[in-house]
Image: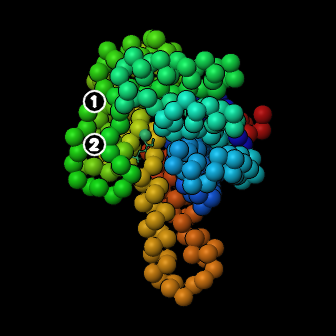
Amino acid sequence: MLVHIKEIIKDAEKRKYAVGAFNIHNLESILGVASAANKAKSPAIIQVSESTIKYMGLKPVTHIVSTVAKNIATHIPIALHLDHGKSFDSVFECINAGFTSVHIDASSLPLDENIALTKHVLEVARPRGVWVQGEVGAMVGGHGLQGGTLDIPIAKFEDVVKFVKETDVDTIAAAIGTAHGIYKNETVNIPLLKRIKSETEKPFVLHGSSGVSDNKIKEAIKNGVNIINVGTDIKVAFSEALIDNCCKNKKERDPRNLLRPTIKAVEKTVLKKMNLFGSYDKVKVLDIET
Ligand code: 13P
Ligand code: ZN
């Protein structure tokens, strides 16, 4: 079922687990996430980037996610979120399309401009009940299979606190040692996370989880991470399954037969993450019946 993101986060905060925010790119990855959520009885956030919106179209992706949530993950809470919205216009379009959560990522601007743009988004989002995620300290990296090391800048504690105080965003993301993509030197700066969490008391969003060790992810959840973004690992699972199937079945000409294994591959990756994040089995039959 499609729910407001706040329903999902309230429970995650109360029961101290994290919810995966899974980047989807097409129908197959949406089906893979929904099917994993069903099997794991786990809440999930399905998130789209601006480039996925460009690829699928805003209306099609919004309708496909809500139809899949309503008809396939019938009893499982699923929320739709915009990931890394870079401009007021793109965030505004998603609010109008019915998203219950949007990320305004002005983290590459000077702090005061980041604050001003985030406040501007909040002015339109809050009266409509839409949650806004803000970001301090730009995330670096890319969504490929890099595998090397990267210079990963860390957000300043004072900047994050000032940003949260002035904007009063609903959820906060900050650069704390992870990067988009898979790099050998990714980590989570736990002391910084702890300080941010105790000073802001906001749900914290960890970006760039692909490439971060399971132990670090567990430690991050213990110390206050509530939402974990998963992008590259889903892309890799999808692409490897597709390439493998195409290579094995070079004469196949039915796209459904070529694409079918990608749904299972995404499902498998997402199930592993739900287990790691502790969101597995969090939707009880009792919750479903009420
Ligand atoms: P990864 O690609 O490293 O999983 O990061 C995803 C992300 O942060 C999307 O916003
Ligand atoms: Zn991100």
Disc 2 vs disc 1: which is toward the camera? 1
- In three-dimensional space, the C-alpha distance between marks 2 and 1, rounded to whole angstroms, equals 11 Å
Closer to the camera in the image, 50 or 100: 50
Ligand 1 within 8 angstroms of badge 2 C-beta: yes
**Residue 253 falls left or right of residue 241:** right
- Ligand 2 sits in which quadrant? top left
Percent across and percent down for residue 238 are 49, 63
Crowd band around label 1 with a 10 angstrom C-alpha radius: few (<14), some (14–19), many (20+) = some
* Disc assigned to residue 154: 1
* Disc assigned to residue 186: 2
Residue at (41%, 35%) from the top-left corner? Answer: 206
Q: Amino acid at mark 2?
A: Glu
Residue at (60%, 61%) from the top-left corner? Answer: 28
State the image quarter where residue 128 is shown.
top right
Let me know if residue 70 appears in the view. yes
Closer to the camera in the image, 210 or 43: 210
Percent across and percent down for residue 186 are 27, 42
